[in-house]
Image: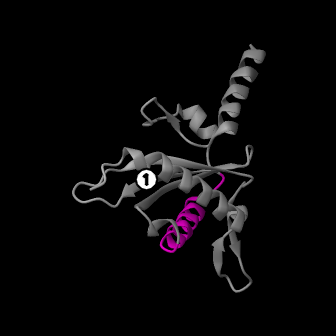
């Protein structure tokens, strides 16, 4: 009985180690995690830290990624201390006439365990994204744009 319990907990923790994203079905649609798994996979970021980090990502977007064919909506940022990874859930919004399709995707970054590793705070309180985090996001967003671009009916 004890061995079974340990194996169940280990399997759930290993599920968290690979990703901090929610489960997705074949179509890429999010599926709710069972309550026990969701509790084990909770982000190391507080709601306030997540909000601040998402704002910094959005702020830098206007000067970088958002200048191209796509606009972006940055929806959620979750980090796992145990796996050292973060998952940024976002939507790519092509700049097209008419109805704008939304392409939900996730960027996974490695070697970040919490707010202090994502955001640098200077002595005067100014905050900016950690350069390594920014570079990993830039690489991921470029790959996602390349993946989504053929799906868009450009006018």
Q: Secondary structure at mark 1?
A: strand
From the viewer's side, name the closer residue of 3 and 61.
61
- The N terminus - image quarter: top right
For image coordinates 53% across by 70% down, the residue present is: 64
Q: Is residue 47 magenta?
A: yes
Q: Where in the figure is residue 8, as x and y percent of width and height?
A: 69, 22
Nearer to us in this view, 20 or 102: 102
Q: Main secondary structure of the magenta part?
A: helix
The quarter of the image holding the C terminus is bottom left
Total tally of numbered discs in the picture: 1
Q: Is residue 147 magenta?
A: no
The one of 95 and 78 positioned closer to us in this rendering: 95
| Residue 70 versus residue 108 in the image, above or below | below
| Residue reaching furthest to the right | 3
Q: Quadrant of residue 30?
A: top left
How is this picture coloured? one colour
Nearer to me, 80 or 133:
133
**Residue numbers of the magenta segment:** 44-63
For label 1, the residue is 91
Q: Residue at x 55, y 50 (%)?
A: 143
Measured along the vertical axis of the image, is residue 73 above or below residue 26? below
> How many other residues sit within 10 Å of disc 1, few (<14), some (14-19) or many (≥20)?
some
Question: Looking at the picture, how far across and down is residue 85, in whole percent?
Answer: 69, 48
Q: Is residue 60 left or right of residue 95?
A: right
* Outermost left residue: 98
**Residue that appears at 69% across and 26% down:** 11
Residue 132 placed where, x, y %? 71, 63
């Amino acid at each position: 009985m004890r061995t079974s319990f340990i194996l169940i907990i280990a399997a759930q923790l290993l599920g968290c180690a690979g990703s901090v994203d929610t489960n997705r079905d074949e179509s890429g649609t999010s599926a709710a995690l069972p309550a026990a798994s969701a509790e084990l996979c909770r982000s190391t970021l507080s709601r306030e830290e997540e909000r601040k980090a998402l704002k910094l990502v959005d702020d830098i977007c206007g000067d970088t990624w958002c200048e191209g064919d796509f606009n972006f909506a940055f929806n959620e940022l979750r980090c796992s201390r145990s796996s050292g990874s973060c998952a940024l859930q976002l939507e790519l919004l092509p700049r097209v006439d008419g109805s704008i399709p939304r392409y939900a995707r996730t960027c996974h970054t490695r070697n970040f365990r919490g707010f202090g590793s994502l955001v640098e705070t200077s002595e005067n309180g100014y905050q900016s994204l950690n350069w390594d985090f920014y570079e990993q996001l830039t690489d991921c967003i470029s790959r996602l744009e390349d993946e989504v671009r053929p799906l868009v009916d450009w006018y």
